[in-house]
Amino acid sequence: MQSSEQCRNAFLSLIAWSEGTSTSPLTRNDGYDVIVSGVSGPQVITDYSDHPFAHGGAVTVRRVPLLVSTAAGRYQVLARYFEAYKAQLHLADFSPASQDAVALKQMGERGAVALVDAGKIEAAITACAPIWASFPGNDYGQGGKSMDELLAKYQEYTTGA
């Protein structure tokens, strides 16, 4: 039986896999260094002292219809959300530990940490769909993974198979 920490880590890995950060050919740090890809090509984070868009800017994801984003890091956290969580959680930087803390806080706000701990992964994915565009059931319209794909990948992360 997996511990709560192992289940939570598997769910965090599931988010990164689903968002495509941990599997990005650009990552050198398990997705923690990935910035949303845009029309000017992919970018990576080289300085973890703060969110890469903390002081303005964004990536133009597409021109028609216009879509810009400040999504960055393993969990594609938007700059405006990171600023709020940075203050709330007393985070010093955008390091991997800070990114994990924000993702766990976001999960907790949706009741998903308790669901993951209880082994209710499908319910946790559904609860988190409004946060991550790659999860089924959100209204971002960006495509994503199916529930079956996510459940199979979570199983892989927890069993090592």
Image (cartoon, rainbow, N blue to C red):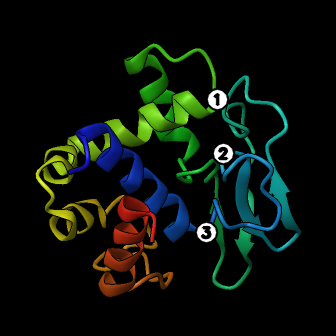
Say which amino acid is labelled 1.
Ser
Give the Cα separation between the discs numbered 1 and 3.
19 Å
Question: SS for tag 1?
Answer: loop
Provide residue 125's location: percent of width, then percent of height: 27, 66
Residue 53 in view of the camera: yes
User: Is 88 drawn above or below residue 33 in the view shown?
Assistant: above
Task: Say if mark 1 contacts mark 2, CB within 8 Å.
Answer: yes
User: Is 24 drawn above or below residue 64 in the view shown?
Assistant: above
Question: SS for tag 2?
Answer: loop
Snapshot quadrant of residue 136: bottom left
Q: Mark 1 vs mark 3: which is more N-terminal?
A: 3
Residue 139 in view of the camera: no
Q: Residues within 10 Å of mark 3 (few under 14, many from 20)?
A: some
Provide residue 104's location: percent of width, then percent of height: 35, 39
User: What residue do we see at 51% from left, 35% from top?
Assistant: 82
Q: Which residue is mark 3?
A: 20
Question: SS for tag 3?
Answer: loop
Q: Mark 3 vs mark 2: which is more N-terminal?
A: 3
Q: Quadrant of the C terminus?
A: bottom left
User: Is 83 drawn above or below residue 37 in the view shown?
Assistant: above
Give the Cα separation between the discs numbered 3 and 2.
11 Å
Provide residue 131's location: percent of width, then percent of height: 36, 58
Say which amino acid is labelled 2.
Tyr
Question: In the depicted view, which residue is nearer to us: 24 or 129?
Answer: 24
Give the Cα separation between the discs numbered 1 and 2.
8 Å
Q: Which residue is mark 2?
A: 32
Snapshot quadrant of residue 87: top left
Say which amino acid is labelled 3.
Gly
Q: Which residue is mark 1?
A: 95
